[in-house]
Amino acid sequence: MSKPNNTRKVAAPRARTTIARAVPGQAAPVAAAASNVTPLTAAIGPLLAQGVLRNAAEVITQRGAQRDTATGQATAPQERSMAATVAAFNAIHKTTLTETQGWAFMQTLKMVRAATSARNGLFNTDDYTDGAAYAALAHEAAESEAAVEATFRN
């Protein structure tokens, strides 16, 4: 018995605004203003993990160009705001978060948002793309922090 093919592939994501149905016991959903929010039932074809990771890499570069570009920078700009964010947070709240923990916090935020969207019958690709990007940035920070720790141990 073959499965019905209820997905279709598209060349590029289509912009759309979706109003989700209410889920019993949950807050009423709000209109989805972003073009990357679709109803869970409106599958437009699965994006393979490699595609998610390519998109995440592109997002890191785009956000770096928007926010972290320095004049005369030799390499392509990438997202590099977490170290400063964590330093400011630590100064304000008298905490000792690391850059890796800052990225982990952002991953958690995206997981919570994805779960909330799903409960409201929505799928927001941004939650998963950003989550993958934050995981990669956390890896980079953790590797750097481990190297610093190893230097101090020797």
Image (cartoon, grey):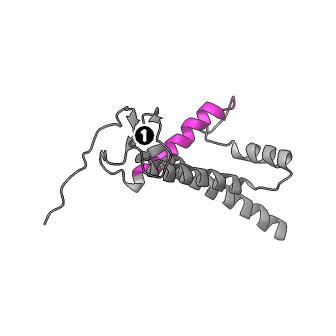
The answer to whether residue 21 shows anywhere in this view is yes
Percent across and percent down for residue 60 are 56, 42
Q: Is residue 111 left or right of residue 43?
A: right
Magenta: main secondary structure equals helix
Q: Secondary structure at mark 1?
A: strand
Q: Residue furthest bottom?
A: 154
Instruction: Using the image as rendered, state which of residue 101 and residue 4 is in the foreground.
Output: 4
Residue 79, image x and y in percent? 62, 42
From the viewer's perspective, is residue 120 above or below residue 34?
Answer: below
Q: Is residue 32 a member of the stretch shown in magenta?
A: no
In the image, residue 54 lies in the stretch drawn in magenta = yes
Residue at position x 84%, y 44% in the image: 92
- The residue identified by callout 1 is 37
Q: Determine the residue positioned at 71% across, 58% down.
A: 144
The residue located at (36%, 50%) in the rendering is 47
Up/down of 150 relative to 6, above or below: below
Q: Is residue 83 positioned above or below 67 on the image?
A: below
Residue 94 lies, in percent from the top left, at 86, 51
Q: Which residues are magenta?
A: 51-72
Question: Given the image, on which type of amino acid does mark 1 rest?
Answer: Val
Q: Is residue 100 left or right of residue 33?
A: right
Crowdedness near tag 1: few (<14), some (14–19) or many (≥20) residues, C-alpha within 10 Å: many
Q: Quadrant of the C terminus?
A: bottom right
Q: Is residue 96 left or right of residue 132?
A: right
